[in-house]
Image: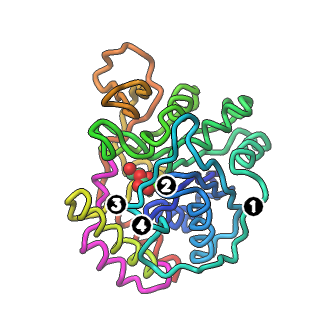
C-alpha cells in the first residue's frame, strides 16, 4: 500500500481527492492535515472532518498553518463559497475529532516514524509542508515523494500564478528546492479534468450518499467556475494527484526544472517551468502535461460506486 498524508484546504476538489483516496485499496491515508487556502484554516480543518464523516474515513485530522510563511492570508471564497465547501448540506459538528497536534508537528512525527515510505499529497498552499521541512530538516530525506497540485505554465489567480502557489510562494520555493522528488499537477493538466453537466449526470446515476455529496459539490463548483472564469466545466484539480498515485499511466509527464518566482512585480508565485531545458539545470519535477480523460472519469466513477 502507498502511504500518504493528504495536506489540503477543502475545498470542493480537495474533498473529491479525499474521496478518491479513501476508496482505493492501494492507498493508505496516514493523516489529513489542513492548511489555510480556499478559506481560513479553522474552516478547512472543519471541512476535512466533515468530509471524513460523510465518507466514513477514520483517520487523524490535524489543523495547521493559518497564514503563509511571509505574506498575509489570502482566500478564494469566490470559488468555494463562505464555508469553503458550499453547496451540499454539511454536518455542523462533525463526529471526527480534531487531532491534538498541530498539522506541522503531525507531519514531522509521521515522517520521522516511517521507513521513508510516506508520500505527501499537498492540494493547497505549501505552508504546512515547508514549515515542517524548516522545523525538522531530518524529514526531508525521508519523504518518499511529493505529489502536489499547484502552478502551471499559466495562472488562474494572476496571469502568471496559480492560486496554491501564489498564496505562499515562499513555502513553494522551500519545497521545490528541497530535493524531494516532486510530481506536479498544475493547471496545464488539471484544466483537462473539467467536470461538465454530463459528468454530473453520470455521477448522479451512481445513487449513493457519497456520489450525491459529490454531485452537490460539483453543481456549486461548476457554477462558480462559470461565473468567475466563464468555463463550462469545473476542473477537479486536486483529484489529479490521487489519480496519479492510483494509476500513473493516465498521465503524460515530462522531467523538468521548475523554479518559483518570489520577487516578481507581475509574476509573484509563478512556477517557471523549463520545458525546453534552457536553464541547463537538473530536473527537480515530474511535470504532468496530459491526461486520458476517459480513464480519469472512469476512475472517479468506480470510486463513487465503491461507496454503495
Ligand atoms: C487550486 O486552488 C483551489 O481553489 C483548488 O482547491 C485547487 O487546489 C486550483 O488553483
Ligand atoms: Ca485545494
Q: Look at discs 1 and 3 and give the one toward the viewer.
A: 1
Which of marks 4 and 1 precedes in the sequence?
A: 4
Q: Which residue is mark 1?
A: 99
Q: Which residue is mark 4?
A: 81
Which of marks 4 and 2 precedes in the sequence?
A: 4
**Residues rendered magenta in the picture:** 189-210
Q: Look at discs 2 and 4 and give the one toward the viewer.
A: 4
Judge: label 2 CB < 8 Å from ligand 2: no
Element at badge 2? helix
Residue 233 falls in which quadrant of the image?
bottom left
Q: Which residue is mark 2?
A: 242
Could you say where residue 195 lies in the image, as x and y percent from the top left? 30, 66
Q: Mark 3 Cα within 10 Å, few/some/many (few <14, many 20+)?
A: some
Could you say where residue 263 lies in the image, as x and y percent from the top left? 41, 24
Q: Mark 2 Cα within 10 Å, few/some/many (few <14, many 20+)?
A: many
Residue visible at 55% across and 68% down? 23
Residue visible at 58% across and 80% down? 91
Image check: 129 left or right of 161?
Answer: right
Asked whether 63 falls inside the magenta stretch, the response is no
Across the whole image, how many numbered discs are drawn on residues?
4
Residue visible at 21% across and 60% down? 231
Question: Do the residues under discs 2 and 1 have CB atoms within 8 angstroms?
Answer: no
Element at badge 3? helix
Which of marks 3 and 1 precedes in the sequence?
A: 1
Asked whether 194 falls inside the magenta stretch, the response is yes
Amino acid at each position: 500500500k502507498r502511504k500518504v498524508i493528504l495536506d489540503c484546504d477543502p475545498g470542493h476538489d480537495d474533498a473529491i481527492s479525499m474521496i478518491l483516496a479513501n476508496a482505493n485499496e492501494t492507498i493508505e491515508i496516514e493523516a489529513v492535515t489542513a492548511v489555510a487556502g480556499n478559506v481560513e484554516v479553522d474552516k478547512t480543518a472543519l471541512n476535512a472532518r466533515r468530509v471524513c464523516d460523510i465518507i466514513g474515513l477514520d483517520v487523524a485530522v490535524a489543523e495547521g498553518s493559518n497564514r503563509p510563511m511571509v505574506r498575509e492570508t489570502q482566500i478564494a471564497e469566490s470559488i468555494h463559497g463562505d464555508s469553503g465547501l458550499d453547496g451540499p448540506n454539511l454536518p455542523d459538528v462533525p463526529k471526527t475529532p480534531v487531532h491534538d497536534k498541530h498539522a506541522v508537528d503531525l507531519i514531522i512525527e509521521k515522517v520521522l516514524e516511517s521507513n521513508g515510505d510516506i508520500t505527501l499529497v499537498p492540494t493547497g498552499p505549501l505552508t504546512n509542508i515547508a514549515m515542517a521541512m524548516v522545523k525538522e530538516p531530518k524529514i526531508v530525506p525521508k519523504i518518499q515523494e511529493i505529489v502536489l497540485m499547484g502552478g502551471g505554465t499559466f495562472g488562474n489567480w494572476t496571469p502568471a500564478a496559480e492560486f496554491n502557489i501564489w498564496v505562499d510562494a515562499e513555502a513553494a520555493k522551500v519545497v521545490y528546492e528541497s530535493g524531494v522528488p516532486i510530481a506536479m499537477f498544475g493547471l496545464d493538466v488539471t484544466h483537462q479534468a473539467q467536470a461538465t453537466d454530463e459528468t454530473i449526470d453520470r455521477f448522479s446515476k451512481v445513487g449513493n450518499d457519497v456520489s450525491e455529496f459529490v454531485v452537490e459539490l460539483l453543481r456549486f463548483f461548476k457554477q462558480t467556475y462559470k461565473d468567475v472564469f466563464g468555463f463550462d466545466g469545473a476542473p477537479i484539480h486536486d483529484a489529479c494527484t490521487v489519480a496519479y498515485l492510483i494509476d500513473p499511466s493516465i498521465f503524460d509527464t515530462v522531467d523538468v526544472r521548475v523554479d518559483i518566482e518570489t520577487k516578481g512585480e507581475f509574476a509573484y508565485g509563478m512556477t517557471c517551468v523549463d520545458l525546453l531545458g534552457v536553464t541547463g539545470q537538473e530536473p527537480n519535477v515530474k511535470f504532468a502535461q496530459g491526461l486520458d480523460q476517459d480513464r480519469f472519469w472512469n476512475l472517479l466513477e468506480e470510486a463513487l460506486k465503491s461507496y454503495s
